[in-house]
Image: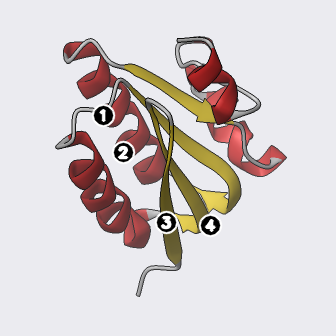
């Protein structure tokens, strides 16, 4: 049973998926479905907010990376709001924090357009 909840909101041209709970193998299906729903609307910018995520494993990282790749292929901007230290450790170990865009506030992207 997934322990992941997702709230979706729009801030101008930016669609934000605000995650809370665990982004693990059980939760990736929930995230992947939410991403598919949002991506079908072809937003100019997509942000995943990780501040409410308590745990993330490699399957959660894979879902994030795949979403970033789809955004790049579709010429859309993709960013993440950093999560807790233990969540960010997954990005650090894999050096993905160097390849993905992180922002402190999704609304800053709406203003920068």
| Front in this rendered view, residue 21 or 112 | 112
Residue 7 at what x, y percent from top left? Answer: 51, 64
Tell me: residue 80, above or below residue 103: below
- Can the viewer see residue 97? no
Number of the label disc, if any, that sits on residue 66: 1
| Alpha-carbon span between mark 2 and mark 1 | 5 Å
The answer to which of marks 1 and 4 sits earlier in the sequence is 4
Q: Name the residue under label 3.
A: 6
The residue carrying pointer 1 sits among few (fewer than 14), some (14 to 19) or many (20 or more) residues within 10 Å by Cα, namely: few
- Label 1: which secondary element: helix
Of tags 1 and 4, the one toward the viewer is 4
Q: Mark 2 points at which residue?
A: 63
The answer to which of marks 3 and 4 sits earlier in the sequence is 3
The residue carrying pointer 3 sits among few (fewer than 14), some (14 to 19) or many (20 or more) residues within 10 Å by Cα, namely: some
| Alpha-carbon span between mark 2 and mark 4 | 15 Å
Q: Name the residue under label 4.
A: 20
- Label 2: which secondary element: helix
Residue 34 at what x, y percent from top left? Answer: 32, 58
- Label 3: which secondary element: strand
| Front in this rendered view, residue 16 or 13 | 13
The residue carrying pointer 2 sits among few (fewer than 14), some (14 to 19) or many (20 or more) residues within 10 Å by Cα, namely: many
Asked if disc 2 and disc 4 are in contact, CB closer than 8 Å, the reply is no
The answer to which of marks 1 and 3 sits earlier in the sequence is 3
Q: In this view, does 3 lie to the left or right of 103?
A: left
The residue carrying pointer 4 sits among few (fewer than 14), some (14 to 19) or many (20 or more) residues within 10 Å by Cα, namely: some
Q: Is residue 106 left or right of residue 45?
A: right
The answer to which of marks 2 and 3 sits earlier in the sequence is 3
Quarter location, residue 100 = top right
| Alpha-carbon span between mark 1 and mark 4 | 20 Å
- Residue at the location (56% across, 22% down)? 96
Residue 21 at what x, y percent from top left? Answer: 62, 71
């Amino acid at each position: 049973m997934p322990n992941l909840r997702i709230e979706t909101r729009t801030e101008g041209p930016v669609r934000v998926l605000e995650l809370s709970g665990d982004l693990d193998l059980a939760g990736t299906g929930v995230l992947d479905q939410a991403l598919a729903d949002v991506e079908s609307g072809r937003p100019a910018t997509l942000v995943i907010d990780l501040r409410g995520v308590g745990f993330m494993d490699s399957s959660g990282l894979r879902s994030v990376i795949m979403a970033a790749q789809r955004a790049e292929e579709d010429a859309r901007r993709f960013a993440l709001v950093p999560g807790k230290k233990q969540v960010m450790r997954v990005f650090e170990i894999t050096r993905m924090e160097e390849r993905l865009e992180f922002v402190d506030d999704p609304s800053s992207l709406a203003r920068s357009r």
